[in-house]
Image (cartoon, rainbow, N blue to C red):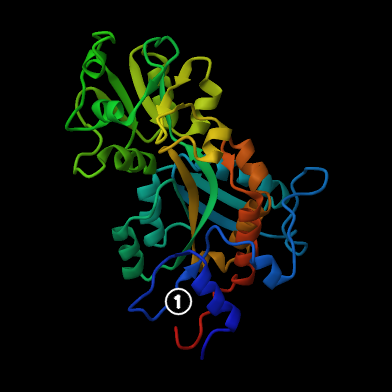
Amino acid sequence: MLPPKNELHFKKTWRVFGYSKCHSRQFLLVGLLSGLLPHFLGCSISDQNADGKFGQVSSDSSNLHGKIIVEGSSTVEPIMIKTSEKFTSFHPKVSISISSKGTSNGLLSLANNEVDIANISREIKQDERLLMEKNEVEFIEIPIAYDGLTIVVNQANEFIDSLNLEQLKIIFRSDLAARTWRDVDPSWPNQKITVYAAGISSGTHDFMAGIIREDTDFGIRSDDCIIFSEDDLLLVRGIRDDSYAIGFFGFHYYKPESNSLRAVKIVNHLNRPIAPTPTSILSGEYHPFRRTLSFCVNRESFNRLEVREFIFFLLRNGSQLVHQAGYVPLKEESYRNSLQLMDIRKEFRWSEKDR
């Protein structure tokens, strides 16, 4: 039996995430959707109440209960924590556990059916998709925010105003791995560089490695000049206490520390030094360090009411939640269209042919 005509339209039009097994399953659908969806649905969904307060996502869930397990990116964690605080104020019988063990560990736990939601700050790797397929775990990836990966130095550092990609490679890449600032620029101090970097399970680590790697096999250095941690706050403290340190983490972790840390301008593809700001991140000027933050939800978990309502609440109030968490919201249309698509696809039905 063929799926309805509008489902065929969905399959051809929108970006897909998930997997297909032996080409027998229909891909799960989500993404940054076109503005056509509201015309098909004949409805609109507001992000929040007119008075700016958060609202419940449905009128029949006042006695909602259950447990939701969330794991993954520490970058995405503040958004999930903010969402959890607001959501449980309406649904106190729902318990939400959130841990930040890195994107890689979050996706591994999702593949092993150990969590309901995995937070991710990078693209899903092919081997991760293959593991999902092997374990017959079906999921949807939902984008929720923009982040600007922020390169940070101590506020006392007066010799760095901006860095270009070649200088970033010299500082961070394993085959170049400058040991002193003078190795990067002869006019800079002959002082040892201390690098604070996201741990190897972190999506932030992989995202940075992907930028500096280019067409080589060399990733982030791992010598005695670098300190890795999955704890972003530890990275913040390390740079704050060392005048010659440098590191990187999500924009959220820089903003409250701007009195003791300084965000380095990045020379972008137009050869312009650009600082990370909500405006430059949203516009794409902060290149190549703008990234999309997302989460993946297990199909079986999504069929549970408490999980579905939690996701609907996040999308309905997306802009406000993301802004309060210290990140850059997507366009309102993106949340609205994702919410509408999730709503009409909430049972994840496949045709008999695809089964």
Q: Quadrant of residue 158?
A: top left
Residue placed at 52% from the left, 19% from the top?
258
Looking at the image, the residue that sits furthest to the front is 270
Viewer-side residue, 262 vs 36: 36
Q: Amino acid at mark 1?
A: Gln
Element class at badge 1: loop
Residue placed at 55% from the left, 65% from the top?
302
Q: Quadrant of the C terminus?
A: bottom left
- Residue 336 rendering spot, x and y as whole percentages: 66, 57
Instruction: Tell me if 327 is positioned left or right of 131 in this view.
Output: right
- Residue 192 rendering spot, x and y as whole percentages: 24, 14
Q: Dot 1: within a 10 Å radius of its alpha carbon, few (fewer than 14), some, or many (20 or more) residues?
A: some
Q: Quadrant of residue 269?
A: top left
| Mark count | 1
The reply to whether residue 263 is visible in this rendering is yes
Relative vertical location of residue 69 with respect to residue 319 in this rendering, above or below? below
Residue placed at 44% from the left, 68% from the top?
138
Viewer-side residue, 112 vs 2: 2
The reply to whether residue 85 is visible in this rendering is no
Instruction: Tell me if 221 is positioned left or right of 34 in this view.
Output: left
Looking at the image, the residue that sits furthest to the right is 51
Looking at the image, the residue that sits furthest to the left is 175
Give the residue at mark 1: 26
Viewer-side residue, 10 vs 104: 10
- Residue 233 rendering spot, x and y as whole percentages: 45, 27
Q: Quadrant of residue 10?
A: bottom right
Relative vertical location of residue 201 with respect to residue 128 in this rendering, above or below? above
Relative vertical location of residue 37 with respect to residue 263 in this rendering, above or below? below
Residue placed at 68% from the left, 72% from the top?
40
